[in-house]
Amino acid sequence: MKGYLVLEDGTYFAGTGFGAAGNAAGEVVFFTGMTGYQEVVTDPTYYGQIVLMTFPLIGNTGINPADLEARGPQIRGIIVKEICDRPSHWQSQQSLSAYLKEHGIPGLANIDTRALTRHLRDHGTMRAVLVATESEIPPTPDQVEEWAARARAAELHDQVRQVTTSQPYHLPGHGHRVVVVDCGVKRYILRALQERNCDLTVVPADTPAREILALEPDGVLVSSGPGNPMDIPATVETIRALLEVPDLPLCGIALGHELLALALGGRTYKLKFGHRGSNYPVKDLATNRVYITQQNHGYAVVEESLPADVVVTHRNLNDGTVEGIMHRHKPVFAVEYHPQAEPWLPKTEHLFDRFVGLMDRYHPVKLLA
C-alpha cells in the first residue's frame, strides 16, 4: 500500500502503508522507547492519537495476548521507520501489521521519522491525517490541502469518556477495598493492586463521590488516562469531595495526578510536545534517587499554583516539571509517571506499596468474606 501523512500545517510525508487500508485523523505524538510498542498500541492513555515511534525498527517481537493493556488497540494510527512483518518471539501470535489490519487501524512506514520528530519538537504536537491506500495515484495538491483541513478539524476532547468503563465491575481480593476511578486504566495497574491482595471495584470516571463512599473503600486510586484534565470537571469535583473525607488514602497516577492537583486547587497547562516514552529521568526529592520512568501525558501541573499544604515530591530532570505531589496533612499523593516493574528499569512499583501502606495505617485489613 501507499501511505501518506498530512499535518494540520500542511507538512506532507509519503511512505508505505501497512495495517488496514483507510485513513484516520488524530493528534500526532512521538514515543521515545526502544521496546513496548504493543503496550503503546493498546494503552487507553493513547486513545485518539497517531503515535510516531522514534526507534527505527518496530514489530520484531510480534503481538501476544499477555502484553495487551486493554481488550484492543486504542490508537488511531502508527508511524514507523521500518516495520517487521516476520516477528520472532516465543509468545508471538501475529505480526503488528496483521493485528492492526484486524482492528481497522492504518500504519505508515518508510518515512524520515527523525525529520517528523524534529518538526513536532520545533512546532509542538499537532493534528494530522494518516492515509493507507491501495491506489497508486499520488494525491493532488488540492487533496493534500483537504486532508490538512480535515486534520485541523479533528476532535481532541472528551477522550476519557470514550475509554472509561460504562459500568462498575469487581475484581475480588482478600485485602483492602480499593475503588479505582477509571479514566483509562491500564491492565498493569489493576494487576499490581491485585498482586497486593486488594479487592477492587472499578468505576466510571464520572461516578459521584457518594457512590464511591457507599462502597466503603479503604482507599481510592484515580487512574491514568488520555487528554486534557480540564475536560472532565465532574471527576475533579468527585476528587474534591473525597479529599474532605478524613483518613481516606487517595492516589493519583498520570492523568490522575493532574486531576488530583486540580482538586487541591492547582492548575495544569499543555506541554509543547508532551512526555511519551520509557526513558524519562525523574528524581525523588526525598531520597535523591533518580528513576528512569515510563510516561505518556501532554499536560503538566503548574508548580506555583499548588497550595502551601501540597509538597512537590518528584521532578522531571529533563525539563523540571512536577512529577509527584503529596499533601502535608492528608494520606494523599500522586505521580505523573506510570509505576512499573520492568526488569531493565529501576523499579517504581513501590508506589503501590506506599498506597497499601497508607491503607494499612488508616484502615487495618479485615479479611473479606
Image (cartoon, helix red, strand yellow):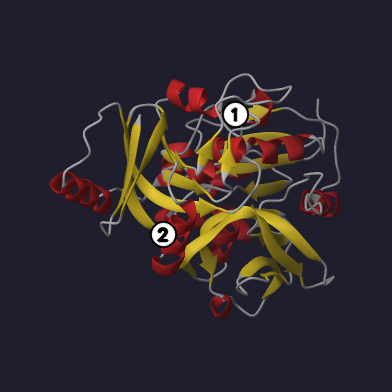
Residue 169 marker: 1
Q: Position of residue 102 (x, y in %)?
A: 45, 21
Q: Residue at x 25, y 54 (%)?
A: 152
* Residue that mark 2 sits on: 125
Residue 362: x percent and y percent?
81, 54
* Residues under numbered marks 1 and 2 in contact, where contact means CB atoms less than 8 Å apart: no
**Label 1: element kind:** strand
Q: Is residue 329 visible?
A: yes
Number of marks in picture:
2
> Would residue 13 appear left or right of 301 to someone viewing this image?
left
Q: Amino acid at mark 1?
A: Tyr
Considering only vertical position in the picture, is 346 above or below 59?
A: below
Amino acid type for the residue under numbered disc 2: Thr
In the picture, which quadrant includes the N terminus? top left
Looking at the picture, how far across and down is residue 125, in whole percent? 41, 59
- Could you say which is closer to the camera, residue 37 or residue 158? 37
Q: Where is residue 114 shown, x and y percent of the image? A: 49, 56
Q: Quadrant of the C terminus?
A: top right
Q: Residues within 10 Å of mark 2 (few under 14, many from 20)?
A: many
